[in-house]
Amino acid sequence: MPPVVRAAVVLLISLAAGICQAELLGIPGSPWQVESHCRKNVCEISLTDGATSEQVLQFPSPPSHASHESGIFLLTFGCGTACSATYAYKLGGQLGGPFPLVEVADSEREVVMSMGDSSVRFYRMFEASDKPLYEITPEFGGYSLLESIADTGIEDHVFRVTYQGKADLEMLEYEAPPLP
């Protein structure tokens, strides 16, 4: 059988069998990697450091970004224009989320800042409730919050959002409460 025909047959057999596609995503500054094994519309997402592997969750696609700080992994999945879902994970099986449009996280105090069209919401990473820990609805200059944001950040557990408000640039601050 000619090599081109053989390659085509192998490809067709692979597609028919639904062989998994594996993908690795490195985590900057960490020995851990995110491993995704995808078949059709389901990906098994795991964390691995080469010696240990833990299954985290199933999702329709691999994560687009991952980070690891203070023992917490944040896995972000894209879901369209101005859309993302972020999950928080602690080794041993503790999973939190999904949280929409996470901009900044305080992993030490287990709080994420999530942006909406008209409000900034703060969630405990591993709380079972979908209710925000705190929510701020600033007054904008006629635009949505997402269009108005100039900068975001965190320092000493204080979240900061600079945005274009009714009176030029304005700033919001929120201090993440300590863990109970």
Image (tube, rainbow, N blue to C red):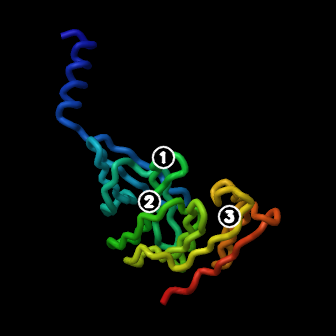
Residue 121 position by quadrant: bottom right
| x and y percentages locating residue 118 in the rendered image | 60, 63
- Please report the residue visible at 25 percent of the width from the left and 25 percent of the height from the top: 11
Disc nearer the start of the sequence (2/1):
2
Q: Marks 1 and 3: in contact by CB < 8 Å?
A: no
* Nearer the observer, 149 or 86: 149
The local secondary structure at tag 3 comes to strand
- Please report the residue visible at 71 percent of the width from the left and 63 percent of the height from the top: 140
Instruction: Classify residue 115 as left or right of residue 58.
Output: right
Mark 3 vs mark 2: in front: 3
Q: Mark 1 points at which residue?
A: 80
Mark 2 vs mark 1: in front: 1
In the displayed structure, 70 sits above or below 33; it is below
Instruction: Classify residue 174 as left or right of residue 168.
Output: left
**Local crowd at mark 3 within 10 Å, few (<14), some, or many (≥20)?**
some
| x and y percentages locating residue 5 in the rendered image | 23, 13
**Local crowd at mark 2 within 10 Å, few (<14), some, or many (≥20)?**
many
* Nearer the observer, 87 or 131: 131
| x and y percentages locating residue 87 in the rendered image | 43, 64
In the picture, the disc for residue 152 is 3
In the displayed structure, 29 sits above or below 134; it is above
Mark 3 vs mark 1: in front: 1
Q: Name the residue under label 2.
A: 32
**Which residue type does callout 1 highlight?**
Gly
Instruction: Classify residue 168 as left or right of residue 118.
Output: right
**Which residue type does callout 2 highlight?**
Trp
In the displayed structure, 114 sits above or below 177; it is above
Disc nearer the start of the sequence (3/2):
2
Q: Distance between the residues labelled 3 and 2?
A: 27 Å
Q: Distance between the residues labelled 3 and 1?
A: 22 Å
Q: Marks 1 and 2: in contact by CB < 8 Å?
A: no
